[in-house]
Image (spheres, rainbow, N blue to C red):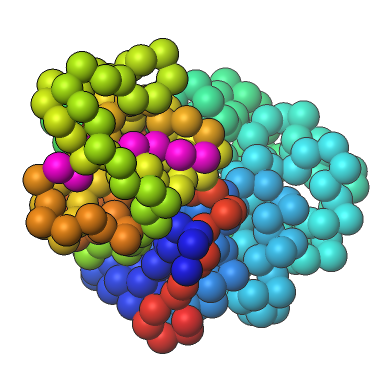
Amino acid sequence: MSQAKLTIDLDAVAANWAALARLSGGAEAGAVVKADAYGLGMERVAARLASEGAHSFFVAEAAEGAALRAVVGPAADIYVFSGHMAGDAPAIEGAGLIPLLNSPEQAARHRAALPDHPFGVQLDTGMNRLGMEEDDWRASSGDLLPLQPRLLISHLACADEPDHPMNALQLAAFRRMTDGTGTRRSLAATGGILLGPDYHFDLTRPGIGSYGGLPFAEAQPVVRLSIPVIQVRTVEAGETVGYGNAWTAPRTARIATLGAGYADGLLRALSGRGQVYAGDTACPLVGRVSMDLMAADVTDLAHPPERLDILCPAQGVDALAGAAGTISYEILTALGRRYTRHYTGDGA
């Protein structure tokens, strides 16, 4: 097989989600499947999580929610983080979505277009990204709370850092804005779940932890990415490899050219910093990662490889992200469409 192969373990996704659900205590555990389930395929992932008992799903925009409805059936709750944008009413109504209203303007739009349709409200507790600020909520809550919103949510800015003072500040703000409302509440994504029961409220939102990423250090690895070797050549000491003569061989070396590059989501920042694996043996990337190709030094391997792995048990998604100077979310969501995708586990 000439294409790079991306293997996605649905059993691992399910096990990670179930572990985070248990850590959520008495709270319901939802499932964040936005961005095509973090690049891993919303249809397969959401179907498996629904079979595991997930009932509440979260997407970024209404179009994602409409596609998800066909996967999870009519009974599941599908919440839309971007709320009710202009032009969204047909999708929201047709797919039975629950927009998380982010501003008084969105609240007015929703009430005008779909006055009897369910909604939730997203509150800004200090992240300054999405949601009603406290003054707007105080002004709007008298009109919105009698309409019985399905959920009040906010998002933590620094949950990956348990000792960061912002966590406690946001928790206090969320309580100040929502205590006594009698409405279901949600504050914790993966990092918030790990902060403990004070952050769980009624519904948690496992995301990156379900897909094998930090801060859920106990997560099972979910993905393996194996790349074909197109050619192996000998490079003499002093010769260079790739664009810009970016790497000079310090010795006679065997260089493998791999059939994937930044068009496949393997970030150019990995140039000269990343590595691929033959089993447990690391082979450093040399030269620049280009659009469709990259090169690795395989001099120390006993035999020329046919394939090398860049995501595998020896190098998980967070380790690769660290080499690229980014985060696991970007690595996963960047994974390209040219890969042959293979699913394992129930639901594959």
Residue 22: image quadrant is: bottom left
Residue 293 shown in magenta: yes
Image location of residue 308, percent across then percent down: 29, 55
Image location of residue 199, percent across then percent down: 29, 47
Q: Nearer the viewer, residue 322 or 305?
A: 305
Query: Which span of residues is magenta-colored?
Result: 292-299
Please state if 280 lies on the left or on the right of 146 as rendered: left
Residue 87 shown in magenta: no
Compared with residue 246, is residue 260 higher up or lower down, i.e. above or below?
Answer: below
Image location of residue 35, percent across then percent down: 56, 49
- Point 39% across, 74% down: residue: 10
Compared with residue 313, is residue 73 higher up or lower down, i.e. above or below?
Answer: below
Q: Is residue 170 visible?
A: no
Image location of residue 107, percent across then percent down: 75, 38
Please state if 240 lies on the left or on the right of 260 as rendered: left
- Point 64% across, 75% down: residue: 71
Q: Nearer the viewer, residue 2 or 66?
A: 2
